[in-house]
Amino acid sequence: MPRDAIKLRLLLVGLLLSLAAIVGVELLPDRTLDLTRPGAVGNLFLITPGDVRNDPPVQWVDARRLHWRCRYAPTDHDFPCGLTLILSGKDPARGLDLTRFHSLELDLAYHGSSPQVRVAIRNFDPRFSKLEDGNSARIQAINLRARDVEHPVVLDLSEFTVPEWWVSQYNLPREYNRPRLDNATSLSVDLPANLAGQEHDLELRRLVLRGEWLDRSLVYFAILSAWMLGAAFLVMRRWAELRRRYLRQQREIDALTARTRALRVEQDNLRRLATVDELTGVLNRRGLEAALDDFEARAEGVTLVLLDIDHFKRVNDRWGHAAGDEVLRRVAAIAAANLRASDVIGRWGGEEFLVACRGHHIDDAARLAEKLRASVENGNVDAKSRFSITASFGVALAPTGTSTLRAFKRADAALYRAKSGGRNRVEVDTTHDAATTL
């Protein structure tokens, strides 16, 4: 089977598996814990005044159905009316981890005049909670309007907050006052309002925690990670393939290089006659001399920019002649890319290049030289990024009717000053700085 067909099949399989995982996690039923189911909690009790023995104001109507009634005299104030479910087992300090759940479904039948119904969860925190102080377990509560519980309601657990009275009473560091549900020891449903002289009837029909079996974010992260690993594998495999191809081509280049060396002796005579430098593709010295002679014959003023690569010998000595040749080619290409069609560039010899610009002012030539200097310095001269290259420049003007040879000598002297002055700079000969005429 062709390799491309195998890759396509693997891609389709990956897409199908990803789609199946996404659909599966979305269709997976909720994790539920029915706290009203018999045996679901360790214990439960009514919240009553502690000092009442006969005819308590809070009594069961039907304990099996979690149905109770509260009746307080008009003189009673701030007494409780509620039901508490114990979520801990034999160890009262170890409750349920509710972080796996996201919501609480409440179905409460309430008949009375209280404007609010409260749902509260106690979370035992061993850093500050004490068994002998029931209130020390952090309380997290939500107050609901009585009309809100006329029908079953779903409460997001993120809605539960720590009340200010508890924060003020215990005066703990700020980080201890943040809601946490990792060790819930009790859950209460009660009435927070003043109950004096009123009768309240409550039946907890249903109290169910809902959550996810699998964290959707983790599932999506796993899918994304699998695709990223697969992509990384393909990239590495492609890189290895390209590296093998590169090594094979390098061997072919080495073989061609060896063959080229054998042919160089035969080509030397032809090179002397040619006007183009074979290495860089620009004019060689013979070609430059012919171009300068042509400028003089046509009595056209010309500005000369002489370029010399800084520390070129170090490149050859450290990185080899192949690297040096590449530097020459890149520098020639950078210079040629910044010239006009009427300008002439050639390799004068070694690491020196000469640019002849027809009809330039000396200032224009200086700006061109500075542009070339910056381009060489900032250019990617070494393809393997092993070293950087700079160049020094000498600029001189050969006005109409003057010798370009003398102008070249002045440019060479200016180049020498640039080298002596620290390299990677432009020096301009100001002997003749008048404008030329086209």
Image (spheres, rainbow, N blue to C red):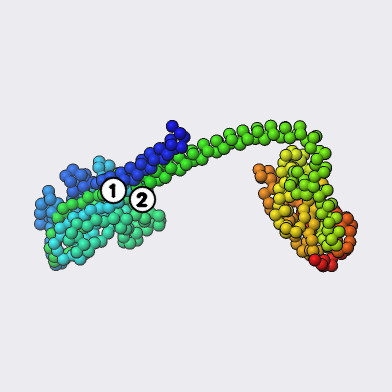
What residue do we see at 79% from left, 43% from top? 313
Q: Is residue 241 left or right of residue 43?
A: right
Gap in Å between the C-alphas at discs 2 and 1? 28 Å
For label 2, the SS is loop
Quarter containing the C terminus = bottom right
Quadrant of residue 249 within the rendered picture? top right
Q: Which mark is residue 128?
A: 2
> Which residue lies most toward the front here?
298
Asked if residue 208 can be seen in this view, the reply is yes
Work out whether residue 256 or residue 269 is closer to the camera in this orientation and state it.
Answer: 269
Q: Position of residue 49 (x, y in %)?
A: 18, 57
Q: Which amino acid lies under the numbered mark 1 shown in the image of this protein?
A: Gly
Residue under numbered circle 1: 211
Q: Which amino acid lies under the numbered mark 2 shown in the image of this protein?
A: Phe
Q: Is residue 141 left or right of residue 419?
A: left
Q: Which mark is first along the chain, 1 or 2?
A: 2
Q: What is the crowding at mark 2: few (fewer than 14 residues within 10 Å), some, or many (at least 20)?
A: few
What residue do we see at 43% from left, 32% from top? 1
